[in-house]
Image: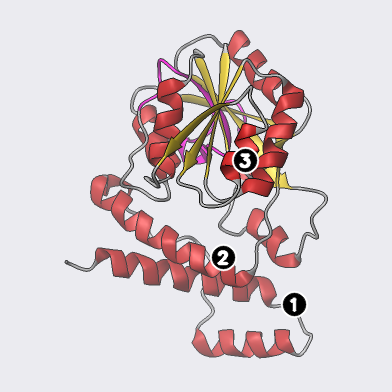
Amino acid sequence: MLSVVVPTRDRASVLQRCLAALERERPAEVVVVDDGSTDDTPDVLGRHPWVHAVRQGGAGRSAAKNAGVEVASGDLVLFLDDDVIATPGLVGRHERHHARHPEEHEALLGRVTWAPELEITRHMRWLERGGPLFAYDQIDDPDDVSWRFLYTANASLKRSFLQPFDPALPIYEDAELGYRLSRRGLRLRYDPDALGHHLRVETPDLTERRMDEVGRAAALLHAKWPELREPPPSMRLIGRLKAAGAAGLSRAGYHALDDRLDDWRAARAYARGYEAASRPR
């Protein structure tokens, strides 16, 4: 039996779309953990009595996922983000994978890409193809995927093999779990046809703020597992003067350097966040 676990917070309208898609998929169980929402999320959950709703008081994504696993009754757990809209067959592909690979350590990574209804900007395309979002294009062997790709926006694992997410990590909680599970023999495979549509709009400013958070989380991750410490993401550092020039050209309508400018802004924000979290307290 497969249980879908969806953590959510203050995304009522998107959650409604997520649940409508899951209702069409007819999984055996859907558990939604409301992490202290202050919007209409309780009303949305109330309109879906088939959903097992759990409420917690703003303890964070990791704690929400852990709470969902605790109450889920399935021997398989499929994690979906609340802004990921399952396309037809997503749940079935996860179920069939585990039927073909019943070994405890077997897991499946599905794909997430921008919802086609969105206006997909140049920046959003960059995020997926060379930028710091999902890096599915870097998967060389779909039958032997690195633990670093355990994106729990769309991934399923055996409940018996799972360990709790680390609630101290606001981001990277899935990669950190992937590392721990890899030490126990995790076998992660990738099925791009287990597809979810990402119903979220991203802008350079939003990405820069998120990369500051990612840098802070990376510092926490490396403090916990020093062997994972590595140089900052391999983004094209172009220097402050060149970045200012690229920004001026972009404002003037010349956009050939926009991807490089995004690289620079993301790398700068990551480094800023990492340094801030690494300072002695």
Q: Please state if 162 lies on the left or on the right of 251 as rendered.
A: left
- Labelled disc at residue 207: 2
Where in the figure is residue 242, as x and y percent of width and height?
57, 87
Write the residue at 51% across / 14% down.
74
Q: Quadrant of the C terminus?
A: bottom left
The percent position of residue 81, horizontal first and vertical second, equals: 58, 40
State the image quarter where residue 236 is shown. bottom right
Q: Secondary structure at mark 2?
A: helix
Q: Residues within 10 Å of mark 3 (few under 14, many from 20)?
A: few
Residue 194 shows in this picture: no
The answer for how far apart the CA atoms under marks 1 and 2 are is 19 Å
- Residue matched to label 1: 256
Few, some or many residues within 10 Å of mark 1 (<14, 14–19, 20+):
few
Q: Secondary structure at mark 1?
A: loop
Q: Is residue 44 left or right of residue 119?
A: left
Q: Which residues are magenta?
A: 140-163
Residue 51 seen from this side:
yes
The vertical placement of 214 against 44, above or below, is below
> Which residue is pictured at 39% across the width and 44% down the height?
57
Dot label at residue 43: 3
The reply to whether the magenta stretch includes residue 144 is: yes
Q: Name the amino acid, label 1.
A: Ala
* Residue 241, percent from left and from top: 53, 90
- Prevailing secondary structure class for the magenta stretch in the rendered image: loop
**Which mark is first along the chain, 1 or 3?**
3
Q: CA gap, disc 3 to disc 2?
A: 30 Å
Amino acid type for the residue under numbered disc 2: Thr
Whichever of callouts 1 and 2 sits on the residue coming sooner in the sequence is: 2
**Residues at badges 3 and 2 in contact (C-beta under 8 Å)?**
no
Q: Is 64 displayed left or right of 224 in the figure?
A: right
For label 3, the SS is helix
